[in-house]
Image (cartoon, rainbow, N blue to C red):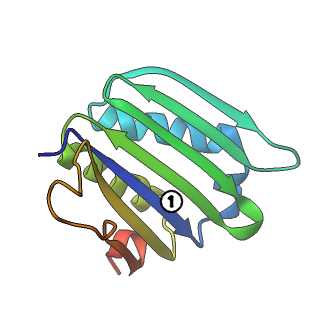
Amino acid sequence: MAIGIHILGELYGVNRQTLSRVEHLEPLLLKILRDHDFKILASSFHQFHPFGVTGFVLLAESHVSVHTWPEEAYIALDIFSCSSEEQALRAFEAICKELAPVEVDRKIIDRGVSWRSLGVFSSPSYETVSGACGTS
């Protein structure tokens, strides 16, 4: 049994303006995390010049991190939660819905599981979906 879920998301084709500025991205992420009942302990976001954002939200449940490349319309998004797997997946889907990417690559890792002890020697699955989190 896993002790946590780690969602690694690569979102392509996202609105460049949203990805460019802290004042656009930070409130969006914090609202979604609050709406999905995560307990936010702290957050820190940095504005790159002329554009681009990196940010980290420390949660009681673990963390969320983002790094953007507006010139590529791309955001790397990580959600790690040792709470509810469904809560983390719903938050990921809500972020995708808000950012409306053209394509999403999502990798899910069950944390705290020894793959070798399960007799599994390949890495976790990696999937590519079209549309906002595969909802096209």
Using a 10 Å C-alpha cutoff, classify the residue at mark 1 as few (fewer than 14 neighbours), some (14 to 19) or many (20 or more): many
- Farthest left residue? 1
Q: Identify residue for label 1.
A: 99
Q: Total label count? A: 1
Q: Which quadrant holds residue 74?
A: bottom right
The kind of residue tagged 1 is Leu
Task: Report the side of 91 relative to 72 (left or right).
Answer: left
Give me the residue at 35% from left, 81% from top: 136
Residue 117 horizontal/vertical position (percent): 17, 54
| Relative depth, front residue between 77 and 5 | 5
**Between 20 and 12, which is closer to the camera in this rendering?**
12
Residue name at image x 71 percent, y 59 percent: 69
**Viewer-nearest residue: 129 or 16:** 129
Seen at 63% across and 49% down, the residue is 67
Residue at screen point 73% across, 52% down: 20
Q: Position of residue 131 (x, y in %)?
A: 42, 77
Figure quadrant of residue 45: top right
Q: Position of residue 70 (x, y in %)?
A: 72, 60
Q: Is residue 126 above or below residue 83?
A: below
Q: Taking 136 as reference, is 10 above or below it?
A: above
Residue furthest to the top in view is 41
Compared across the picture, whether 41 is left or right of 45 comes to left
